[in-house]
Image: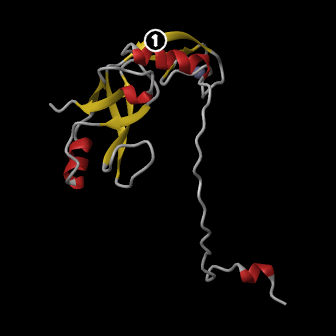
Amino acid sequence: MTDINTAVGTDDPNIAIQGNWNFDYTYFAGATATRFFRELERKHLYGTRCTSCARVLVPARSFCDACFARTDEWVEVGPEGVLETFTIITAQFPGLPKPPVVMAYVTLDGADTALVNLVKGLDVTDLQQATDLLQSTPRVRCVFKDEPEGRITDVHFELLVP
Ligand SMILES: [Zn+2]
């Protein structure tokens, strides 16, 4: 009889299991996220301030993720910020533009947490050249589309190339 610990040894290749998730859904954003998106419709970016640690959380949240205290003050942030990190996505994902696309974490001026969104307006045909430009450009600005709809896609980042 084979011992179960021997059967799952390191030389046993992993099996591959096929799967597929494909479903549509709708959810209610809640009061805080709804106001955040309403402000995007008006071409403003807002965060909320924690009543305990005083950090400004962006996107706006009802509770602080660090101390679990309520937030109670709305603070306008941006329109510029610090590019914290980024990735260049080369595979097609539902809801994203045709690849390659640049996704970045940006701490907007006046905020203490980073907002993730697309970076547009740079040439990504040469991935190394795009990476070099992103790594050497510490600041970005927010650009709103002409007719916002109250979605995160209303705004994107563009590099502030000196
Ligand atoms: Zn806090």
Q: Quadrant of ligand 1?
A: top right
> Residue, x 36% and y 16% (percent of image)?
43
Q: Position of residue 98 (x, y in %)?
A: 33, 48
The quadrant holding residue 18 is bottom right
Q: Is residue 97 visible?
A: yes
Asked whether 99 or 114 is in front, the reply is: 99
**14 sits to left or right of 45:** right
Type of amino acid at the residue the image marks with label 1: Val
Q: Looking at the figure, which quarter contains the N terminus?
A: bottom right
User: Residue tagged by mark 1?
Assistant: 75
Asked whether 44 or 137 is in front, the reply is: 44
Q: Position of residue 153 (x, y in %)?
A: 39, 30
The quadrant holding residue 104 is top left
Q: Position of residue 56 (x, y in %)?
A: 49, 19
Height in image: 123 above or below 10? Answer: above
> Residue, x 21% and y 30% (percent of image)?
160
Q: Is residue 45 visible?
A: no
Q: Looking at the figure, which quarter contains the C terminus?
A: top left
